[in-house]
């Protein structure tokens, strides 16, 4: 009976608090990166259209920086999530 009770109990995914905190930080990074995944290519497209109209390069450069920032945020998010799941 005792072995059945232990097997039916709910197991915790995170055994310690630092791993849980690291996982939450990773999710926060993903939450920041999600809108940027959609906005940065749109800004680059608008920047290319602005160049054709002779307006300048500001939006194109801004979009490129946002794309690099988004890539960095996604990499950091996955790094933190994997770190918390594998307890490293």
Image (cartoon, rainbow, N blue to C red):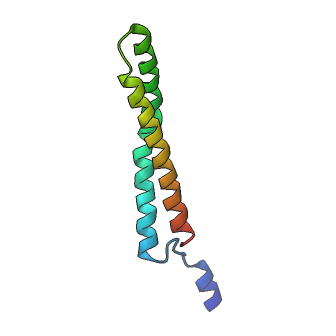
On screen, 6 above or below 17?
below
Q: Quadrant of the N terminus?
A: bottom right
Residue 74 x/y as whole percent: 49, 48
On screen, 85 above or below 35?
below
On screen, 49 above or below 3?
above
Q: Left or right of 50: which side holds 9?
A: right
On screen, 3 above or below 46?
below
| Residue that lies at the very extreme toward the top in this rendered image | 53
Q: From this viewpoint, is residue 1 visible? A: no
Q: From this viewpoint, is residue 3 visible? A: yes
For the point 50% across and 43% down, the residue is: 71
Residue 35 x/y as whole percent: 42, 38
Q: Quadrant of the C terminus?
A: bottom right
Residue 27 x/y as whole percent: 44, 55
Q: Left or right of 18: which side holds 85?
A: right
For the point 46% across and 33% down, the residue is: 38
Residue 76 x/y as whole percent: 48, 54
**Number of marks:** 0
């Amino acid at each position: 009976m005792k072995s059945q009770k232990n097997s039916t109990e709910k197991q915790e995914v995170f055994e310690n608090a630092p791993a849980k905190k690291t996982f939450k930080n990773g999710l926060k990074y993903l939450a920041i990166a999600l809108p940027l995944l959609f906005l940065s290519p749109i800004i680059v497209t608008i920047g290319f259209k602005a160049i054709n109209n002779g307006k300048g390069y500001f939006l194109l450069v801004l979009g490129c920086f946002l794309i690099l920032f988004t890539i960095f945020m996604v990499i950091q998010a996955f790094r933190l999530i994997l770190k918390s799941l594998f307890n490293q």
